[in-house]
Image: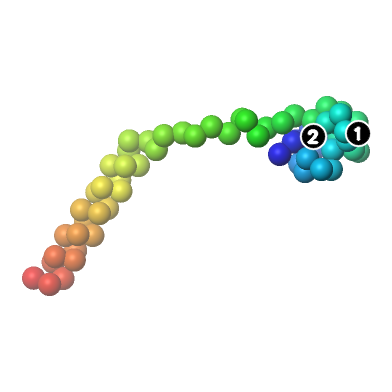
Amino acid sequence: MPWCEECSRYFAPTAMTQDGNCPSCGRMLDDLSGAVTDEKTPWHFKLLVAALLAYLGWRIIDLFV
């Protein structure tokens, strides 16, 4: 969504003027739609999930034994 630094708010594409400016202050809006990038999951988060699954698996086994 386009962001206006001067007004400090996001605008829907339909709320902008025809040339892509802010309707309130008239400044050119920054388009941040391409700024979001996919990031990989950190290796230590995967390790934490694996350790949690191992612990819960052991607790389930311990419950029935």
Residue 46 makes an appearance in the image: yes
Which residue is depicted at the point 78% across and 40% down? 13
Q: Mark 2–mark 1 contact, CB under 8 Å?
A: yes
Q: Considering only order in the chain, which callout, 1 or 2, is on the residue closer to the N terminus? A: 2
Report whether 19 appears left or right of 32. right
Please name whichever residue, 2 or 45, is drawn nearer the observer in this view of the structure.
2
* Quadrant containing the N terminus in the rendered view: top right
Q: Secondary structure at mark 1?
A: loop
Residue 15, compared with residue 56, is above or below; it is above
Residue 9 makes an appearance in the image: no
Dot label at residue 63: none
Report whether 16 appears left or right of 47. right
The residue labelled by disc 2 is: 4
Q: Secondary structure at mark 2?
A: strand
User: How far is the residue under mark 2 from the one under mark 1?
Assistant: 9 Å
Q: Amino acid at mark 2?
A: Cys
Residue 26 placement (x, y as % from top left): 91, 31
Please name whichever residue, 43 or 18, is drawn nearer the observer in this view of the structure.
18
The residue labelled by disc 1 is: 25
Residue 25 placement (x, y as % from top left): 91, 34
Which residue is depicted at the point 58% across and 34% down? 36
